[in-house]
Image (cartoon, grey):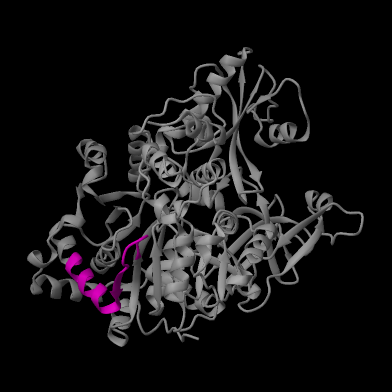
């Protein structure tokens, strides 16, 4: 196991330098490209290039503490650019590259919202996005000072040793408590919550989380996860980079089209670990033809960690059922509970041990009581997310934030040695969720024999393929579609068992009664969702005054979802 | 030129009645055709035409015209 000493290096850059010194020729990143030769960065070659990027960053006038949003597709120069920004004391913030279906105005609104909230100072992107982003810079109210295109920089031409030395001296002075990066916790457009993490928080987390998974120098992580997501950024990028092990990075866009790429990378690189949101288990198990698996071997895998979505037992069963004959060990299945606000993980199942599953009475669980299922029970199978990792605490609380006894379901509150300091420029949101050092997650769960089980959410967030969506975003966008009675709409997530994830459904009140009009309205609702890059899977149309209101006078998501899914109301039209 | 057969398989998978498709139509143009649905559409096309695509072939597809040409090639048209 790696003996990670947090006193040895106090910032991320110093840690990377140490790794480059100790193991210069070890591969840091294998940049995987479907059907092509991978690009391989050793720790030394990546650090050398990162130094050159940092000289350019300085030349552009970017200063310590300023936020550099990186909006770049899968590109081998992403990694040294990220490291180079960190070396100067500026904060890298990885943002998603816009999907072509996202309306340009919505993309700009999202960036603008983030710039005000997160204080984005610079955008580092590809030339292709210039027409979209330039108007933001020209807007006098924008916090964004400039847009740069780092993939076009002539790094060798611009490099000079004087600047390099100055940056190194400066970098030496960066404090462990200084902010190291900014990530956004969730949300679709303007609702993202900016989380700033210090060098100390990340390095502490690497140490204690690494211990919980018994990370060793022989490990190698394969990942297709986007780096704007905490699981991709912390578990599959920062963790291996700080520990001096290799990570194989696959494009998320390519993976979703050709899921076999991950298995191919694991086989060829002999990867030992990967992190997956639950839906990926279903995709890998069910959407790859056996013909494509002839040369696949998963014998090297010792951990496949399920995170970012509720862990579903049937997804694990499908996965092991399919890949056992390709060498996958049952005990490699693992899970963890994690969030951006605590850098990443709070709990982790024990490596090498089969993941714990409990069968509880579904009805009792709905009433907040954890009772083992009996013969006549309707059963719900809950999968453990593991035990607490070092420096983390969990408290299960009731609606008044008082701790409940074991055996009861409640909201999960967490504490961590790698906790965030609050949402950046968002004190009111921080005050809502942080109290006496506890972060109230909004997730529901229970403790059973010292393992934690996450079973639902207090908030109405919809998790589609590991991506958190706020129903408010969808409702606001769809609300303006002609034919919907304004304000009489709700969005919610519906479980899709075949995909192993939730899909978005919308219920809207309308006066349309004609089949043709309803079909046209449905299409327009789906198109409205497309503008914010949300795929609305199912549309329910109901007559005026059908939706049940909450005590606040707004349509209730929970009550209406229950009404829809529990009965067959002839007034409901759906497709 | 997109055949009615291919168009209908795609529309059925997306639960759509009608949507104009040309060779140049790309997934983000079509309601419901997102990255998660893409793989379902590919599987539906394989099943309907009784063909098998390799992942690398699917990865290279840029638009519906490319998909049509791939189907045609598999069927030796």
Residue A170 to residue A78: above or below: below
Residue range of the region highlighted in magenta in the rendering: A32-54
Residue visible at 64% across and 13% down in the picture: A513
The magenta stretch spans residue A348: no
> Considering depth in this image, is A16 or A537 the residue closer to the camera?
A537
Residue A462 placement (x, y as % from top left): 58, 44
* Residue at 25 percent of width and 79 percent of height: A44
Q: Per the image, is A52 magenta?
A: yes
In screen coordinates, is A61 left or right of A520? left
Would residue A549 be found to the left or right of residue A437 on screen? right
Q: Is residue A398 above or below residue A55?
A: above
Image quarter where the C terminus of chain A lies is top right
Q: Position of residue A206 (x, y in %)?
A: 46, 74
For the residue pair A24 and A37, the one nearer the viewer reads as A37
Horizontal and vertical percent for residue A443? 63, 53
Residue A298: x %, y % from top left: 54, 73
């Amino acid at each position: 196991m790696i003996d990670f000493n947090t006193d040895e290096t106090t910032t991320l850059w110093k840690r990377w330098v140490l790794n480059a010194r100790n193991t210069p020729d070890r591969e840091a990143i294998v940049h995987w490209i479907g059907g092509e030769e991978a690009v391989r960065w050793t720790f030394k070659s990546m650090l050398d290039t990162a130094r050159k990027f940092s000289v350019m960053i300085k030349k552009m006038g970017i200063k310590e503490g300023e936020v550099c949003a990186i909006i770049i597709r899968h590109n081998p120069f992403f990694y040294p650019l990220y490291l180079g920004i960190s070396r100067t004391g500026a904060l890298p913030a990885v943002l998603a590259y816009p999907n072509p279906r996202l309306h340009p105005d919505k993309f700009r609104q999202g960036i603008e919202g983030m710039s005000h909230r997160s204080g984005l100072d610079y955008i580092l992107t590809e030339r292709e996005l210039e027409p979209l982003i330039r108007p933001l810079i020209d807007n006098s109210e924008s916090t964004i000072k400039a847009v740069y295109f780092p993939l076009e920089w002539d790094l060798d031409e611009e490099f000079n040793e004087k600047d390099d030395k100055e940056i190194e001296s400066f970098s030496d002075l960066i404090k462990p408590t200084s902010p190291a990066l900014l990530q956004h916790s969730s949300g679709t457009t303007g609702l993202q919550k900016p989380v700033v993490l210090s060098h100390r928080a990340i390095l502490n987390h690497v140490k204690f989380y690494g211990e919980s998974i018994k990370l060793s120098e022989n490990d190698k992580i394969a990942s297709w996860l986007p780096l704007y997501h905490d699981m991709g950024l912390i578990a599959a990028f920062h963790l291996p980079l700080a520990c001096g092990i290799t990570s194989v990075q696959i494009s998320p866009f390519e993976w979703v089209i050709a899921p076999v790429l991950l298995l191919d990378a694991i086989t060829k690189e002999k990867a030992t670990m990967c992190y997956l949101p639950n839906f990926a288990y279903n995709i890998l198990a069910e959407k790859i033809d056996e013909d494509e698996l002839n040369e696949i071997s998963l014998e090297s895998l010792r951990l496949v960690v399920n995170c970012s979505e509720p862990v579903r037992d049937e997804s694990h069963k499908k996965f092991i059922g399919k890949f056992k004959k390709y060498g996958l060990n049952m005990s490699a299945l693992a899970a963890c509970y994690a969030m951006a606000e605590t850098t990443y993980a709070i709990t982790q199942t024990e490596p090498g041990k089969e993941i714990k599953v409990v069968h509880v009475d579904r009805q009792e669980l709905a009433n907040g009581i954890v009772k083992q299922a009996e013969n006549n029970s309707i059963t719900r199978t809950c999968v453990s997310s593991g035990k607490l990792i070092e420096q983390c605490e969990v408290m299960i609380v009731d609606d008044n934030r008082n701790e409940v006894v074991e055996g009861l379901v409640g909201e999960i509150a967490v504490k961590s040695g790698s906790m965030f300091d609050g949402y950046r420029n968002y004190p009111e949101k921080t005050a809502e969720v942080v109290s006496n050092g506890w972060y109230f997650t909004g997730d529901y769960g229970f403790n059973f024999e010292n393992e934690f089980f996450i079973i639902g959410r207090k908030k109405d967030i919809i998790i589609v393929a590991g991506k958190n969506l706020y129903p408010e975003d969808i409702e606001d966008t769809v609300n303006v579609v002609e034919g919907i009675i304004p304000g009489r709409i709700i969005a919610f997530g519906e479980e899709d068992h075949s995909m192993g994830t939730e899909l978005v459904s919308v219920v809207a009140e309308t006066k349309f009664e004609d089949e043709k009009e309803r079909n046209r309205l449905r299409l327009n609702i789906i198109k409205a969702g497309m503008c914010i890059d949300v795929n609305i899977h199912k549309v329910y149309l109901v007559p005026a005054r059908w939706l049940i209101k909450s005590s606040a006078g707004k349509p209730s998501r929970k009550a209406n979802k229950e009404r829809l899914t529990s009965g067959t109301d002839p007034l409901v039209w759906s497709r | 030129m997109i055949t009615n057969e291919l168009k209908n398989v795609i529309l059925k998978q997306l639960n759509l009645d009608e949507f104009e498709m040309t060779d140049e139509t790309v997934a983000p143009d079509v309601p419901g055709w997102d990255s998660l649905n893409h793989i379902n559409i590919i599987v539906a096309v394989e099943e309907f035409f009784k063909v098998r695509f390799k992942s690398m072939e699917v990865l290279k597809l840029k638009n519906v015209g490319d998909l049509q040409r791939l189907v045609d090639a598999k069927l030796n048209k």
